[in-house]
Image (cartoon, rainbow, N blue to C red):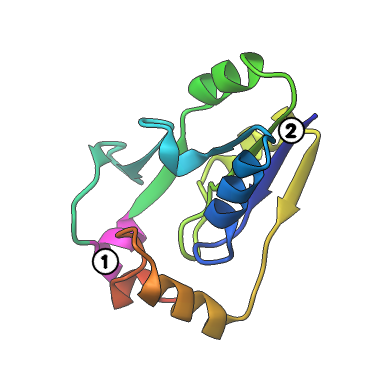
Amino acid sequence: MKILITGVAGTGKSTISKALNEKGISSIDFSDVPGLCYWQHKITKQLENPLVKNVEWLDAHERICDIKKLKEILNQRGDVIITGVANINIANSNQGEYFDLFDKVLLLQCSPETIVKRMVLRKTRWGRNKTERIIR
């Protein structure tokens, strides 16, 4: 069975992935696969990944998943749980193209206060900046 666990940043996707792997259950966090997801300009389609993202930059760009690479990962494994996909309040803009690759899709949610608390305290870079935490 192939399962996708998604949700906005701070809902616990990476924590779940780590816990599953510790229990011997095959889980892959999207953020651990180089090149699986990337930012591109909505109009020019130019790939970009600056260190600082302001509101204007976030509005002009979209997060994309490399479907071919995702299919390769899924084809290399039997049962697998994939976690990730969403960043803050935007999911990968092409997520509708890969939902059908999974037997189940689970959406994690929690309160905005919990999300902000987790993001401020997290060790990874994404979401620690207040601009990246804007909920539209």
Q: Is residue 59 magenta?
A: yes
The residue that mark 2 highlights is 102
User: Mark 2–mark 1 contact, CB under 8 Å?
Assistant: no
What percent of the width, then of the height, locates residue 126? 34, 60
Callout 1 secondary element: helix
Q: Is residue 131 left or right of residue 86?
A: left
116 and 23: which is toward the camera: 23
Looking at the rendered structure, the kind of residue marked 1 is: Glu
The residue that mark 1 highlights is 56
Callout 2 secondary element: loop
Look at the magenta stretch and give its main secondary structure: helix
Q: Residue at x 36, y 46 (%)?
A: 42
| CA neighbours of label 2 inside 10 A, class few (<14), some (14 to 19), many (20+) | some
Q: Is residue 136 visible?
A: no
Q: Which quadrant does the N terminus fall into?
A: top right
| CA neighbours of label 1 inside 10 A, class few (<14), some (14 to 19), many (20+) | few
Start and end of the magenta stretch?
53-60
